[in-house]
Amino acid sequence: MFITLNFSVPSKPPSDVRGKYFNTTALGFYWNSVPDNHKNGIIIGYQWIFFSSSGTVLKSGNITDIKLSHEFLGLQLWTNYSFMIRAYTVKGYGPWSALITQATDEAGGNSALNAETDFIVGNTRLFSC
């Protein structure tokens, strides 16, 4: 008996991608896996890109374990940074997530962002209630 599996690339990006302010020079980005009905196989990793506020690629990389987050240290004060991520299977890469933007704080912690709950999606700053 033979079973044929028709794996493909993920048809959706990772879900609920979000940024989090850690301190004046550090940010984290978090996500959930691709929705089950859009994985189209076993997710074996994630590829990410990290951008400056001007759109220049600062870093890129792959995560090949079950980790669903990545942290960036040594950033500039009071600066916007952006992040995109996509999942991949043995067949290739799925679509990119939306571009998520998160800001570091100025020295002294005088920011309008709440470090625990606020983040920026596109050009919209989202606040907790």
Image (cartoon, grey):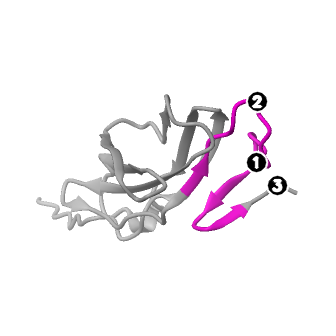
User: Would you say residue 18 is visible in this rendering?
Assistant: no
Point out the tag, 2 or 1, that comes first from the N-terminus: 2
The residue where tag 2 is placed is: 108
Q: Quadrant of the N terminus?
A: bottom left
Kindly identify the amino acid type of the residue bearing the numbered disc 3. Answer: Ser
User: How far from the left and from the top, in percent, is residue 99?
Assistant: 48, 63
Q: Pointer 3: residues within 10 angstroms few (<14), some, or many (20+)? A: few
- Which class describes the residues within 10 Å of circle 2: few (<14), some (14-19), or many (20+)? few
Whichever of callouts 3 and 1 sits on the residue coming sooner in the sequence is 1
Q: Is residue 61 above or below residue 83?
A: above
Q: Nearer the viewer, residue 14 or 77?
A: 77
Quadrant in which residue 106 is drawn:
top right
Disc 3/disc 2 C-alpha distance (Å):
22 Å
Cα distance between the residues tagged 2 and 1: 13 Å
Say left or right for 57 vs 111: left
Name which residue lies at 49% across and 28% down.
74
- Position of residue 67 in the picture relative to residue 42 (left or right): right
Amino acid type for the residue under numbered disc 2: Gly
Viewed as shown, does residue 58 lie left or right of 105? left
Disc 3 marks which residue?
128
- The image's mark for residue 113 is 1
Q: Residue at x 56, y 56 (%)?
A: 101
- The single residue placed furthest to the left in the displayed view is 1
Image: magenta residue range: 101-125
> Is disc 1 placed on a helix, strand or loop?
loop
Label 3 residue SS = loop
